[in-house]
Image: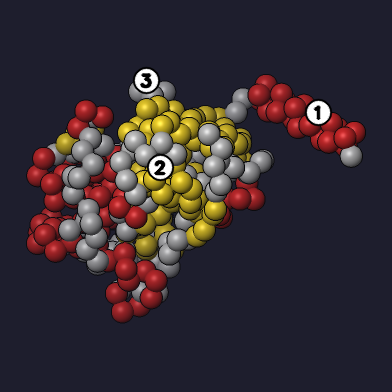
Amino acid sequence: MLIRVGFDIAYSCPQPVATVLKLGIEQARAKDLLKPDTIVVEPDAPLREFTDCFGNRCTRLTSPAGVTRLKTETIVRDSGEVDEVNPEAREVPVEELPDDALRYLVNSRYCEVDKLGSFAWSQFGTVKPGWTRVQAIFDFVHNHIEFGYPHARATRTAAEGLEERLGVCRDFTHLSIALCRAMNIPARYCNGYLGDIGVPPDPAPMDFNAWTEVYLEGRWYTFDARHNIPRIGRIVVARGLDAADIPMIHTFGAHCLQEFKVISEEVTEQQQQQTALQSKAEMQAQAEAA
């Protein structure tokens, strides 16, 4: 399966400001890209890439005063398989967890494990440990929070999401993570592309999505409290403790979002043929130029 992904984002700044972008597809999927997902910046500005402590691709630039536009588009080769389900996956005792998994058990900016510990154990303490318990947490969050873009609030925490029962995908994800960590199950925040592949089209404009990865029996599994069904075509952009670790656009000064368009869609057979012809023509042109 081929999936076309990309974005066209514009924001304005009252004055030049240092900026860090976390918009590149995870390094592990580089081999699956038919062409690099290079970010085009308008007006042109020097870019420098680095990798943060979570392994995310980051890009540094100085956003000028006025409007900055960010664009990219690529095609990703994907297996077309749904998220893996393993009902027999067991919890790993804390003393046996890998060292790098321990940080996914603690409090973070939006996931107050200490505040939710008593609730989590009273709600899920008698549930069979392992996959069954994790799925029970995600079933609860899926049914507890009402999704709606008007409900979005950048400062809402997991505890506030539990109380208010409103939110968007990041709120579903924060509450799920906090409840898993309260049960001593490592959980981390992911964002990325998730198109309407294999499901009825969503009439709302496409957006980046947030979901969770949970550590069970020696590996990370994907869970998604908002949709709560295995999905096709997830493409990770970044991971962290919570949303505070992976802002898509972090300006060290004021900025105002002007435009926001995200693409994530399956490439049809006809589109694949057109892409192949275009690639062939480009290669031929390059050969002639050489």
Q: Is residue 279 left or right of residue 71?
A: right
Residue type for callout 3: Pro
User: Circles 3 and 2: CB distance less than 8 Å?
Assistant: no
**In x, y percent, where is residue 122?**
10, 59
Q: Residues within 10 Å of mark 3 (few under 14, many from 20)?
A: few
Residue type for callout 2: Pro
Is residue 249 positioned above or below 50 on the image?
A: above
Between 234 and 199, which is closer to the camera in this rendering?
Answer: 234
Rounded to the nearest angstrom, the CA distance separating label 3 from label 2 is 37 Å
Q: Is residue 34 left or right of residue 58?
A: right
> Which residue is tagged 1?
281
Mark earlier in primary sequence (3, 1)? 3
Q: Nearer the viewer, mark 3 or mark 1?
A: 1
Q: How has the structure been colored for display?
A: secondary structure
User: Helix or strand or loop: what does disc 3 sit on?
Assistant: loop
> Which residue is tagged 3?
203
Query: Residue 16 shows which numbered tag?
Result: 2
Mark earlier in primary sequence (2, 1)? 2
Q: Is residue 125 left or right of residue 227?
A: left
Q: Nearer the viewer, mark 3 or mark 2?
A: 2
User: At 66% across and 41% down in the image, what residue appears?
Assistant: 35
Is residue 31 positioned above or below 197 on the image?
A: below
Residue type for callout 1: Ala
**In x, y percent, where is residue 259?**
40, 27
Rounded to the nearest angstrom, the CA distance separating label 3 from label 1 is 36 Å
Where, by quadrant of the figure, is residue 11 drawn?
Answer: top left
User: At 61% across and 36% down in the image, what residue appears?
Assistant: 75
Q: Residues within 10 Å of mark 2 (few under 14, many from 20)?
A: some
Q: Nearer the viewer, mark 2 or mark 1?
A: 2
User: Helix or strand or loop: what does disc 2 sit on?
Assistant: loop
